[in-house]
Amino acid sequence: TVKNVPKFAISVGDFNGAYLSNITFATQSDGIHVMGAGKDLIINDIKGFTGDDFIAISGSDYVNNNYSKGDISNISINNIYPTNTQGNIVVLFPGNNGTNNLVFRNVSISNVFGNTTNASVVACNSYGAFGDPSTGETAGGIVENISIRNVYGSEGGNYMNFSVDTIYNLTIENAYPKFNNSIVNFTRGFVRDVNIKNIRFPNNSISRGINF
């Protein structure tokens, strides 16, 4: 168990093959925070409580935290069990390098359980700025070939949020929200080739469901 870390409990950057598994958090900020450039990232069987995002993957970050940056390819996140975490369960923000959008390629997220005050899965242009084209190197970003399957977490905000500049080839399969917020919410950017199936609406739902 990793306890009471004031900032990122586990941080990885500029990597070639990273494997993080069987970890429990009881900490104040992000649980796992990964920064590019990198390839071949596996995150599996993660549990516990975090005071901010449970798992955050960034191509570029805010100035004070931006110790490495770049594209990331081959991301696998599986078997995630947060308990009342105070951020998003899984958040991706590729961002930019000051000149061009950074790219996340081949992303697989599966078997997400637990609960959070925010969203279960997010691919965004900056933390907490869904739909706002923010300035700086957390803005923008491209995600190519992303699959999200078997999401059972309960959310405090929208279930899944997408606001990067561009998404190519997105699959969402088997998502079961507990509350009446939007289930899949696209707030900005360009989206191509989306496959969504087996989305269950809560009983007596007043949700907008899938929102473009």
Image (cartoon, helix red, strand yellow):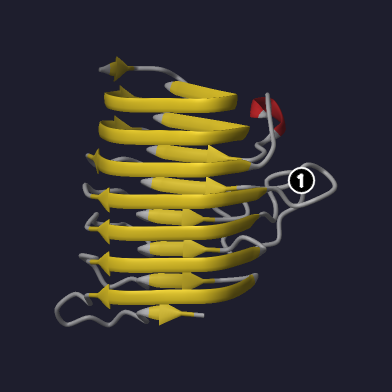
**Lateral position of residue 169 relative to residue 51, left or right:** right
**Badge count:** 1
Dividing the picture into quadrants, the one containing residue 47 is: top left
Above or below 133: residue 6: above
Query: Which residue is rendered at x = 50% and y = 35% of the image?
Result: 40
Q: Residue furthest right?
A: 99
Q: Residue furthest left?
A: 203
**Lateral position of residue 179 relative to residue 122, left or right:** left
How far across and down, in percent of the image, does residue 165 sit? 67, 63
Where's the N terminus, which quadrant? top left
Query: Which residue is rendered at x = 27% and y = 74% of the image?
Result: 199
Query: Which residue is rendered at x = 40% and y = 63% of the image?
Result: 160
How far across and down, in percent of the image, does residue 32 sit? 43, 30
Above or below 19: residue 105: below
Dot 1: element: loop
**Lateral position of residue 46 relative to residue 76, left or right:** left
Res. 131 visible in picture: no
How far across and down, in percent of the image, does residue 12 sit? 53, 24
The crowding category of the residue bearing disc 1, from other C-alpha atoms within 10 Å (few below 14, some 14 to 19, many at least 20), is some
Res. 109 visible in picture: yes
Query: Which residue is rendered at x = 37% and y = 82% of the image?
Result: 208
Above or below 162: residue 195: below
Residue ID for mark 1? 136
Mark 1: amino acid: Gly
How far across and down, in percent of the image, does residue 70 sit? 69, 37
